[in-house]
Structures are given as C-alpha cells and as structure tokens.
Amino acid sequence: MRLLLFTPNPIKTSSSLYFLNSLRSNLTKRTLPTRRSFIPARMAIPPRSIASAPSCTTTSGRSNVNIEEGLASKFWIKFRRESVFAMYTPFVISLASGTLKIDSFRHYISQDSHFLKSFAHAFELAEECADDDEAKLAISELRKGVLEELKMHNSFVQEWGIDPGKEGTINSATVKYTDFLLATASGKVEGVKGLGKLATPFERTKVAAYTLGAMTPCMRLYSFLGKELQAVLDPEEDGHPYKKWIDSYSSESFQASALQTEDLLDKLSVSLTGEELDIIEKLYHQAMKLEIEFFLAQPIAQTTLAPLTKGHNPEEDQLVIFSDFDLTCTVVDSSAILAEIAILTAPKSDVVQPETPIARMSSADLRNTWGLLSGQYTEEYEQCIESIMPSAKVEFNYEALCKALEQLSDFERRANSRVIDSGVLKGLNLEDVKRAGERLILQDGCTGFFQKIVKNENLNTNVHVLSYCWCGDLIRSAFSSGGLDALNIHANELIFEESISTGEIVKKVESPMDKAQAFNDILKNYSSDRKNLTVYIGDSVGDLLCLLQADIGIVVGSSASLRCVGSQYGVSFVPLFPGLVRKQKESDGESPNWKGLSGILYTVSSWSEIHAFILGW
C-alpha cells in the first residue's frame, strides 16, 4: 500500500483542479475523463534524515544535450525514443565497449563514407535552393564540415587498412537512406512540387527547409551518440580501438556543427505553414528511423548482450518478465484513483440518502478520513524506514535485507487493515473502477512494450504483474484497453456485492515479502527443462527483494527511498547502458551470464530503454 494525500499538488494546483472538476463531471455521467493532468505527490517518501544523504544522489549516466528551444529541439525531444533504440543497437554497444571486430568497423566506415558523400551533395542542392545569402553561407559552411568528416574517414582508411576497392559495395540500408536524402533535396517530397516546377524563391526555400529536416536528425543523433559513448570510456584504460571515432563525434566542433544545422532548420522554417511544418516533422522522423536501420544493418561477428531476446529459441528458452504496476507502469498511484472515485461518488452531507445494505460516509467525511489515513501512513512509513536502516553501509547481504523488510511488511499490513476498518472503500461501483482503469494513462512506451512481447510468436514469454493495488479489476481494465488480456495479474481484490464494494479486501500482495513469495511461487510452475531467464521491472522499496532475486532487475524512475535503502544494504544501482557496455566488454564475445542475487540493479529513465534492451527495434 502506498497511500497518497488527495489534495492538489501545490506546484500544479490549476491542473489538479482541472482533473478533479473533470472527474467530478464525468463520474456524474458514469464515465471518467480520457485525459488526466492531476498527478498526486507520492506520500511514501524517504525519511528526512536520509533524503539528503550524498549516497542517495544518483545520476542516470546519460548526457544532457543543451539545445535552444526551437523546431529542431521539439522534434528531437518528440522522437528521442528513436535515439535510444539507435544507442542500444548491437553495433553501437560493441563499438562503445571496444569489442567490435575490426572487419565490422571497416564495413561501417565504408558504408558511412557513401552516406557522407550523399550528405555533402544534399547540402549542395540545399544551398542552390536557399534564397537568403546568410542561409547560403551557413549551408556552405556545413557542407565544408561534412567534407572534413570525409577526410577523417580517409584517416580511418589508412589507420585500419581499409581497401576502398574491396569495401565499395553499398548495402540496402545505406541505399535506402541516401535515396531518401537526395530525393528530398531534389524536391521529390510527397505533397511538394518537383524542383523544376518551383517558380518562386519561396517555394525553392521550402525545399531547402525540407532537406535540412531530413539531415538535422542525423547530425544530432551522431552528436548524442558521441557524448554517450565518451561518457562510458574508462579514463584509466589505454588503447580503446575506436577512441578516435568517439572523440571525433563528441568533440566541441562536431557538437557546434549539429547546433548550426538545427539553427538553420529553425530559420528556414520560420515562414512555413502548419502543413509544411508537418512535412518537415515526417521527414525528420523518417530520417531517425532510417538511421536505426543503418546501424542495424552493420554486420556483427560476436555475441552481443542486446537485444536480450536475440538468439532466443522458444523450444529451449523461457523468458519470464515480472513488473510492478503503480508508478512503474502508471503515472498515478492506483490508491489515488480509487480514493477520488470514492470521494466524488459519495453522498453529500446535506442530502438525505435512501437506506442501502452498504452504508457510505459523506464525501466531506470521506475526504477528511483519507487525509488522516494518508498522514498517519506517511509518518509511520518514515519511522519504519529509519528503523530498518543500518548505521553504516554494509556489503550486499540479501538475508539481512529480507529481515529488515519484514518490519516494513508488518507496517504495510497494519496500514491496509486501517483502510478496511475505516470503511473508505465501501460503496465503490465496479463499473466506475473499470472505466477508470480503461482511461488510466500508463508510462510512455509501457503498453507498446508489453504488446510487442505478447504478440511475438517467436518468443516463449510470460508476463506477470505483481502489485499492492487494492483492486485487481483496475489493473486488468488498464491493460485490457491496450489488448493485453493475456497478462497475469497478481494483486489484492476488492469484494463486491452486486457490483458495489463492501470495503473489504481479499489480501494477496500487501508487502515486499508477499511479492517475493509470489515471485518464487510463480517460478516453481515453470519447467526446469528450459533455460529460464527472469526480468523484474519495479520502482520502489516494495520491489527490492524481487528486483534482486531476478536474473535482471531493472529500476524505473528515481525513488529516493529505494536507492537509499538499497545502497545502505550494499546494492549497486548501475545505469543500464553503461552497465551493458561494461558487461559486453567483460563477456569478450561469450554468451552473457545473467544471474540473480548479484547485488546489481540496472536503472533506466524510460520504458524505451527497457524495450530497446530486451526486444530491440
């Protein structure tokens, strides 16, 4: 249980009131809003004494790209998901780790040289179309930068002994991108006149803008990858075979070129209509996708850690994915949703209600009771966390952590009993709960990941959701709206009589210990004849035991209490991408050894990282 205080967030008061008003209005019509802007603050916060401890400060391991606000910046943010998929390709991970075979790198340099020649030609065509002298000069300078990049490739040719005569064949992914780029630069864009028919300078300038729209994402993506790979280089290590490549794309000069390209796109797009800007957006997105295909097309000779399901044999392998629900899959804790439904459907204190088998308190009394329960929960949670923290960090000890979390489990059970005894869950209508679930907004990328998992017939995979949620029907409705009825839901259940809640809960998963027990019970049902690989995805202290037991534990978000408790008990939190690069290097081409209870958990900033790591593009 993670009780929330159901009052508007002081930072987002207006949006919170909008949600409450919208919810109130729609519940009157027996429905719930399709959009939600109210995100209550989580009350299960870490104790003040440890919240500011230096050990609790973690970073994602991801570099920040400082881009001024503009069209290019908006597109980069909108399609950032694609940059994650590019970063997690086998080629990029192998390159970053230094384990990429030299023949693979030679092939890549050859393909990239073909691409850069087309890039330079596209800049030349864009310069011809630009009407403004300043824009012409800017494009000319960018073209010179590409020619310098080609010279860098020539130095690679000499350093790694690439024979242009043998490496000259262009693969289909390279052709696909270069054809797209040159067609765009020639004015062959859907909905746009052919270049020869562009009578006015303005129409020709539009083609220059379209061309920059197809080129800008490539520049930004390489700039992004250069910085990411630079960040994972070991400063103590000499002799990384591809350090020169990484240094080139992480250099200040290349970063400046990427920014100049984006600035130019912004300037060329100033006078365009909404429809024309939509065309640029489509070109930008298409270029991002073609870049991913370009990286995926590079031949890899060694075994790679990503995607995790590469080489999966459904006859021999079994992938079991476990996930928490509240604030792992969702943006709002389920208790907040159930509380607001209860409050907004409760009778008013000044209205005489007909007698019913299940008596309900008034909405005012209900809100006050929720507030008291939330306050008590928060205070006791803080005290409980403080009581289980060792005075100093210890080496990883799973048994000691289990013993400590038994105290937290006892606290969670007492808190749930108080909720039941208070009667605040009485009178909830099952249909209201299901409608709320259907309209529940999940974390970006969560639904798509699970959809791809369950629909992939080449995978032998099962998904189990373990949740403290008081009402499994809410979870089932949330996933069924995305066609995910096949997910196995393990949660508590509200008891309904003729679709009206009695306020009682069938207690199944109340605590960290309950989750760990459910995790182990589920695994007992899987055949030992297969190679079972387990992944657990969670966000809170309640997930800690399962995260550690799984072969791969992935932490979503940045829960301070989870990281503080884990760190004090010797758990290491490693950003996923740097962790994969390090593990790829250590594996040295051998099949990776994933094993639970290692004391290492991997952190991600989004579900896109999870998707890219487990499934790939």
Image: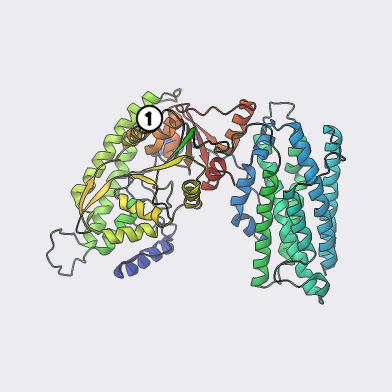
State the residue in front, 256 or 577.
Answer: 577
Please state if 418 lies on the left or on the right of 6 as rendered.
left
Disc count in the image? 1
User: Could you tell me residue 31's position as x and y percent?
Assistant: 33, 66
User: Could you tell me residue 602's position as x and y percent?
Assistant: 51, 36
> Can see residue 399?
yes
State the residue in front, 78 or 524.
Answer: 524
Identify the residue at image location x=73%, y=64%.
210
Residue neighbourhood size for the residue with mark 1, other residues' Cα within 10 Å, grouped as few (<14), some (14–19), many (≥20): some
Identify the residue at image location x=21%, y=67%.
348
Q: Quadrant of residue 496?
A: bottom left
User: Could you tell me residue 534's position as x and y percent?
Assistant: 45, 34
Q: Secondary structure at mark 1?
A: loop
Q: Quadrant of residue 538?
A: top left
Q: How is the image coloured?
A: rainbow
Identify the residue at image location x=71%, y=72%.
271
Where the N terminus falls, by quadrant?
top left
Q: Mark 1: which amino acid?
A: Met
> Which residue in the structure is indicated by mark 1?
389
State the residue in front, 5 or 482.
Answer: 482
User: Could you tell me residue 375's position as x and y percent?
Assistant: 29, 48
> Can see residue 5?
no
Identify the residue at image location x=67%, y=35%.
94
Can you say whether 220 is above or below 107 in the image?
Answer: below
Can you say whether 146 is above or below 354 in the image?
Answer: above
Please state if 378 lies on the left or on the right of 182 as rendered.
left
Q: Residue furthest bottom?
A: 199
